[in-house]
Image (tube, rainbow, N blue to C red):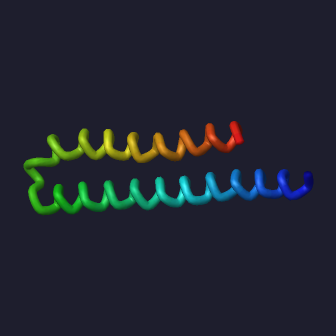
Amino acid sequence: MENVESARLIAKALTMTIAMAGSALAEGYIIAKALEAIGRNPDAASNIFPKMIIGVALAESTAIYAFVAFFLL
């Protein structure tokens, strides 16, 4: 029984660690590329920025789903 509880706790830790790290990397990549695009073409900033915010929100949602899975495991 002790092994089952240990495996459950390890699964919870891995779920949060991998999801949070992946989400942070994705958000950083999205923001870096959007700012790079705005730097190349400043006139397109009004078109790029809202799409960047939506992309970051979608990337953050994976972290929120992992947080929910953390409590369900």
Q: How many labels does the image show?
A: 0
Image location (x, y in percent) of residue 28: 39, 59
Image location (x, y in percent) of residue 50: 25, 39
The residue that appears at 56% across and 59% down in the rendered structure is: 18
Q: Above or below — where is 68 with respect to 39? A: above
> Is 71 placed left or right of 49 in the picture?
right
Taking depth in this image into account, of 35 and 16 the one nearest to the observer is 16
Q: Above or below — where is 29 with respect to 1? A: below
Q: In which quarter of the image is the C terminus?
A: top right
Taking depth in this image into account, of 55 and 72 the one nearest to the observer is 72
Q: Which corner quadrant of the image does residue 17 belong to?
A: bottom right
> Is 30 placed left or right of 9 in the picture?
left
> Is 25 placed left or right of 37 in the picture?
right
Q: Above or below — where is 40 with respect to 68? A: below
The residue that appears at 46% across and 45% down in the rendered structure is: 60
The residue that appears at 83% across and 57% down in the rendered structure is: 6
The residue that appears at 62% across and 37% down in the rendered structure is: 68
Image location (x, y in percent) of residue 16: 62, 53
Taking depth in this image into account, of 19 and 56 the one nearest to the observer is 19
Determine the residue located farthest toward the right in the rendered image: 1
> Is 2 placed left or right of 17 in the picture?
right
